[in-house]
Image (tube, rainbow, N blue to C red):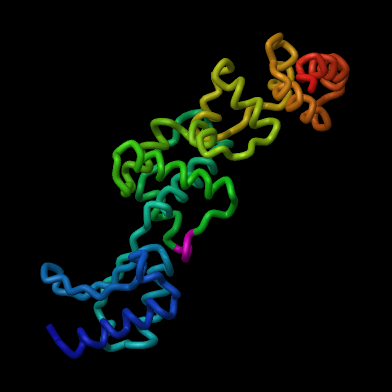
Amino acid sequence: MDSDRATRLHRLARTLTQRFGLDLHRHEAVEAEWSGSARAWTFAWTDGPTVAQVRAACREAEPEASEGLLYVRTLSEASVALGAVRLTVSTATGPARRLLVRPADVEALFRDVPFPQPRTDRERALVYAVVYEIHDAHHRNQADAEEICGLIKQYGLAMLLRRCGAELSPVEILTDHYAATHAHPAWRYRLAPMCAGVLFRAVREDPRASAELIAAALALLPGLPDECAAAEDELRARLERNTPTT
């Protein structure tokens, strides 16, 4: 092993860690490692820049020392959970069946995405819920990619959405309540809501509908056909009866 090259590569790894703003304390830093079995140097890091970005930076800074260098970018548990959630939700318009998201699918999703981050508060809450669920179930602060994908496949996202206390839209409030009785597994697994018209009729036909459900049904009215609007007075009367007085 060339000691001069080793020194240059270790120095380059530190430079890239600083250039890309990677956190040394979260194991994101670029590490230069020699593999005796592969007879090659490897740059390994977590999340952060893409392989293409690091390769280009290496070739620009140390074209000679980086010749034959291997690049391995791993994803943290939070990034794996984010990718699994995003892939699962993105199929909400597809067939109403379970979706098996694999770790390889998540890697492919983020292959050209630097610094994967949640786009919304809901994504952030679901990522936390997935990781927490595995940590709590196994009594350890670690969740591997297979466990993350397996958890979503087994339980779906609706349960996790409820546990993380995320705010639901009116159509989601109604779907979460009526999906089980209407055999709508797409909500349980992928957060695909039911048809607003079906949900409105479900509330009308449900003599035990709570004030929250009735209010959610009324919130759907602007986008429903005229025949649904004809039931507005009936539902408002029920809402008044079901709302506790102070």
Q: Quadrant of the N terminus?
A: bottom left
| 28 lies above or below 126 | below
Q: Residue furthest bottom?
A: 4
Residue range highlighted in magenta: 112-116
Q: Quadrant of the C terminus?
A: top right
Q: How far across and down, in percent of the image, does residue 168 sit? A: 64, 36
Residue 110 is left or right of residue 72, and the answer is right
Residue 182 is left or right of residue 82, and the answer is right
Q: Nearer the viewer, residue 37 or 12?
A: 12
Residue at 37% from the left image edge and 43% from the top image edge = 148
Q: Nearer the viewer, residue 159 or 6?
A: 159
Residue at 33% from the left image edge and 73% from the top image edge = 30
Q: How far across and down, in percent of the image, does residue 177 sit? A: 61, 22
Residue 121 is left or right of residue 104, and the answer is right
| 81 lies above or below 193 | below
Residue at 68% from the left image edge and 36% from the top image edge = 169
Q: How far across and down, in percent of the image, does residue 173 sit? A: 65, 29
Residue 7 is left or right of residue 61, and the answer is left
